[in-house]
Amino acid sequence: MQCRLLRGLAGVLLTLLCMGLLSLRYRSSPSPQRVPDTPELSPPSPRPSELQLHDVFIAVKTTQAFHHSRLELLLNTWVSRTREQTFIFTDSPDESLQERLGSHLVVTNCSAEHSHPALSCKMAAEFDAFLTSGLRWFCHVDDDNYLNPRALLKLLKTFPQTRDIYVGRPSLNRPIHASEPQPHNRTRLVQFWFATGGAGFCINRKLALKMAPWASGSHFMDTSALIRLPDDCTVGYIVECKLGGHLQSCPLFHSHLETLQLLEAAQLPEQVSLPPLSPLPGYSLVPAAGGLMNPEPLVKDWAEALWLSLASQAALRARGRSSVCVLGWGSQSLAGPLRNEQAQDQDWMMTGAECISSPWEACCTVQDWGHK
């Protein structure tokens, strides 16, 4: 009996010992590793394509009084090479311009006056049209500016697309001051830089979208009225005071407030914009209108600015011969007809013609030229 009891106890103890060993073995065995979730790989965002001229929205501000005297020159020269992305903003309908430009002539409901509200009204129309266009850059110029499309594109390509860009040339050597209305009939003095509209300026879309609360629709005129300053100043105020941005000052823009005599002739083709200048005695300019030349020499200030834009300016002066610039013609199209000993069209004849090409226009020195 006693032996059976001992055997039973031994069996129980052996059973308990085996269960304990099995329990320890189970606990010490490594638990299966949890496979980490594979992160979803988003497709790489496509790199923005290289900036092209057709990515730039060029707005030209004008008024009815200058439709003929200024716009004709623009349409025959640089606008002829940027027609697809250039839009003319005016205050009055013009059937002739409408036929030539179609939807690229934008007739606003703005006043023809040269007042702060009228100027801001047109700038607001330009800004809204740009936002609607979906293009990557907004560039504004006045109707008496010569714009160099190649130099403009070269400049805009230098800016990183991830930054807010506001580029132009200030007309002052110091920030401008403005009184900003505050609650309880108080004002706050603010200062900021702005790019003068007379020289032209550009804003990329990234920044323009941020400007919209103060610059789109009627907001632009409201903002302009708030600080009592014109359109170009208002742009600078929005960028610097409302958004904390900064003007990128660029010396390649030029307005009527300066002179180009400080520039070397070789530097002229690198400039983005050129202002109107006073006529230079002894030089005649002839626009290309239909035929080889038009019998009416141009004596307008703006046309003289075009002539000064030529890289061959110094050479023309040095030759001491009569000089004729054919505006709106590229150097290739002039190479054939004007390098001959005698170049002529239906009404005009030049003898001893020698052309000097440039990236913008083309000029020829001649021994003699006149009506047949």
Image (cartoon, rainbow, N blue to C red):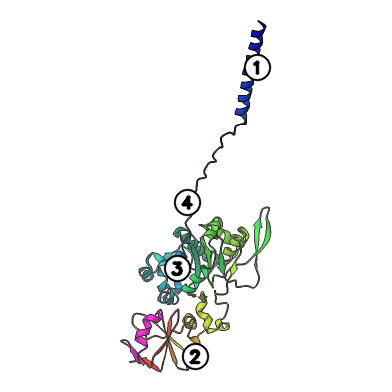
**Residue type at tag 4:** Pro
Local packing at callout 2 (Cα closer than 10 Å; few below 14, some 14-19, many 20+) is some
Tell me which residue sits at (63%, 24%) in the image. 21
**Residue type at tag 1:** Leu
- N-term-proximal mark, 4 vs 2: 4
Seen from the viewer's position, the closer of residues 119 and 171 is: 171
Q: Nearer the viewer, mark 1 or mark 4?
A: 1
- Name the disc covering residue 234, or none: none
Q: Contact (CB < 8 A) between labels 1 and 4?
A: no
Q: Mark 3 points at which residue?
A: 53
Q: Mark 1 points at which residue?
A: 13
Residue 46 seen: yes
Tell me which residue sits at (49%, 74%) in the image. 151
Q: Mark 2 points at which residue?
A: 317
Residue 348 seen: no
**Residue type at tag 2:** Arg
- N-term-proximal mark, 1 vs 4: 1
**Residue 171 placement (x, y as % from top left):** 60, 73
Q: For this view, does 246 lie left or right of residue 299?
A: right
Question: Gap in Å between the C-alphas at discs 4 and 3?
Answer: 29 Å
